[in-house]
Image (cartoon, grey):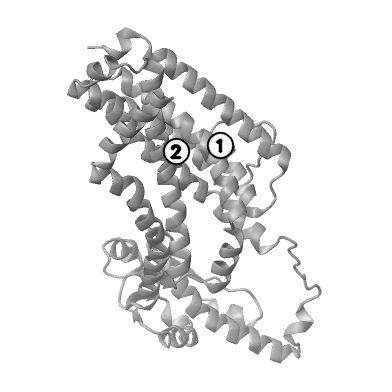
Amino acid sequence: MNRIGIIFQKELKDMLRDRRTLFFMIVFPIIIIPLLIGGIPKVMTGIMKEKMTEEISIAVIGSEYSPELISVISSADSINLVFNLEEDSLEVFIRNKEIDGAIKIPKEFTDTIESFGTAELNMIYLSSGDFEAVKKRLEIAVNMFINEKRAERMERLGVQPQDLEPVIISHNNIATNQEQIGKAAGGWLPYMFILYCFMGAMYPALDLGAGEKERGTIETLLASPAGRMEILMGKFGVISLFGFLSAISGVLGLIFGLQFITDIPAEIVETAKEIIQVKTIALIFLMIVPVTVLFSAVLLSFSFYAKSFKEAQSLVTPINFLIIVPAMVGMIPGIELNWKTALIPIVNISLISKDILAGTVSLGMLLEVFSSMIFLAILSLIFTRWWFNREEVIFRG
């Protein structure tokens, strides 16, 4: 046991000397998560606000058929109407960004409205990654006209708005704020923690396996009084530590973001603070422990097999997809935790974390997920030990 501690200290010192590793594995998550929480919504809100207020040009075909509609649209802010274009050229002008959109008013438009019919108005626009701002702004302007005509009809018919509502639905969602926010955020938060855990373990695993082989120091270590199992456990301990610290850094980044980012609605922040309690975080990290062990063992196995650091990176890269895809399953609506999904690695962690954050987790599911991941973690350790004892693996190439 003492030799394992010596190997652990030796490998830990080597890792701590690499400032780049420390930054990307521990400091980077604390910085990037607040930026994701507060920065992305702020950027999207700013872009949307700009799109909804910038000047746009809208071509009109058939303006003579409803001067009243044209007057209402003209009164809208930052909408310039163009009247001299041919109908056949509208699509070309929109695609060339010479105009932003167009509306076509049919000849019978006004007569249909006056006779209490439903007139059709054709909007033409190009929606491709602009938040459909042109469509929304046209709808806002046209809805002003629609509301005016609706009010006129009610007045002529002697009808009040409430007379047209035979049934009013009263919504009573019994889900608590914690359940709603927990289910919504519970998909992507575990995804981030799992990803950081994997990334935190990856670089130390590559360096302590393939890196040592490339530097030629693995032979010196094997010639020491420490046995192979002791060497393996010392390296494994450092890799697991870095993976776990990276996941902890992600949680700290989340807490930091909730405390200091002001663009998040106050009710969401308060509910999130209620959710992120010591018990909740402890349960999530209890689930991450076997995941860290699994990642560390698998990565170390690949690292020992590789001839060089570069080859190890090539071998490990496809594993990213095997981690990302199952972790993303937890974000798909309708996929719930049951006795079957509780046995699927990574998927079960994502789903159980969602239930933990929502406060709806059951002890039975918690034990099943934890037990299945512990079983896989033990298997991965047994395999890594067997793999490390093979001479053709350690001295490959």
Give the crowd class for mark 1: few <14, some 14-19, many >=20 residues within 10 Å: many
Classify the position of the C terminus by image quarter. Answer: top left
Residue type, label 1:
Val
| 227 lies above or below 167 | above
Please tell me which residue is depicted at 72% across the width and 84% down the height of the picture.
161
* Number of on-image labels: 2
Q: Which residue is mark 2?
A: 324
Q: Nearer the viewer, residue 395 or 98?
A: 395
Q: Position of residue 121 (x, y in %)?
A: 51, 71
Is residue 311 in view?
no
Q: Is residue 328 left or right of residue 43?
A: right
Please tell me which residue is depicted at 33% across the width and 52% down the height of the picture.
28
Give the crowd class for mark 2: few <14, some 14-19, many >=20 residues within 10 Å: some
Q: Position of residue 153 (x, y in %)?
A: 67, 86
Residue type, label 2:
Ile
User: In the rendering, which numbered label is found on residue 347?
Assistant: 1
